Amino acid sequence: MVMRLAICGQFFLDLELWLQLRQLVVSELLRDTRLLRVWSVGCHVGKEPFSVAMMLDEVATDVPYSIIASDYNESILDRARRGGPFNGHDLDNVSQAQLERYFRPGGPPHYVLPSLLERVTFVEHDVRGAALDGQNDLILFRNIEPFFAPEVTRSVYRALCATLRPGGILFVGTSDELTNLAECGVERIRASMYRRQHG
């Protein structure tokens, strides 16, 4: 069974990495595409794809984007599709301005607003099978790897990287390590981030 290591995690888990990702999105991805395609793999209850949606709403003012969020567990996806509830430390890295802009008033518990919820498409999918089709600009695959056998991990990384467009970014967790760089066709550009090579 695949579970999230960060089940009790937060929006913008590892905030410093998210700030670096934000810089990459602005400086590279948004300048090199007409439609930004994002895939959040193993999205659990939605904190990660909703974090992406908040970030893109703030920085992608001139470029349309799509966010696919997948998980193998349909009951977990049902909660994600409801946009909550979220409590306690879930929102430690959410600013007051973001809380007021993207969440319903009156919490806790907190629910994301419909305007944010509609930015994300949730689909049932087991990443250990075939990858979803598409040429993605950004894939988030964070803190899931420790629950896979090494040979499964290598296969999953190959499949995910194959769906990245040249120049696309794979964003992994602090507990993850991509060791088969050459066969995945990516290069490490900073902590927890890999870029699909051209050619």
Image: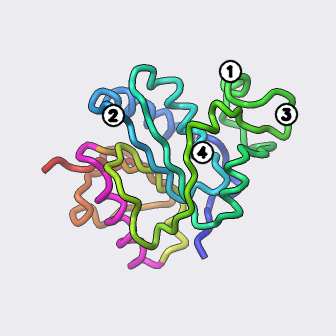
Q: Mark 4 points at which residue?
A: 13
First reached walking from the N terminus: tag 1 or tag 4: 4
Disc 3 residue crowd, few under 14, some 14–19, many 20+, Cα 10 Å: few
- Numbered tag placed on residue 29 in the rendering: 2
Residue range highlighted in magenta? 149-167
- Numbered tag placed on residue 97 in the rendering: 1
Residue at the far left in the pictured view: 199
- Numbered tag placed on residue 107 in the rendering: 3
Residue 170 image offset from top left, x and y in percent = 38, 50
Q: What residue type is labelled 4?
A: Leu
First reached walking from the N terminus: tag 2 or tag 1: 2
First reached walking from the N terminus: tag 3 or tag 2: 2
First reached walking from the N terminus: tag 4 or tag 2: 4
Kind of element beneath mark 4: loop
Q: Which of 175 and 186 is in front in this view?
A: 186
Q: Name the magenta segment's main secondary structure.
A: helix
Question: Disc 3 versus disc 2: distance between alpha carbons?
Answer: 34 Å
Query: Mark 3 against mark 4, which lies toward the viewer?
Result: 3
Kind of element beneath mark 2: helix
* Lateral position of residue 182 relative to residue 128, left or right: left
Depicted 6 relative to depicted 23: above or below? below
Name the residue rendered at 68%, 23% in the picture: 101
Quarter of the image with the N terminus in it = bottom right
Residue 179 image offset from top left, x and y in percent = 32, 65
First reached walking from the N terminus: tag 1 or tag 3: 1
Q: Which amino acid does label 1 sit on?
A: Ala
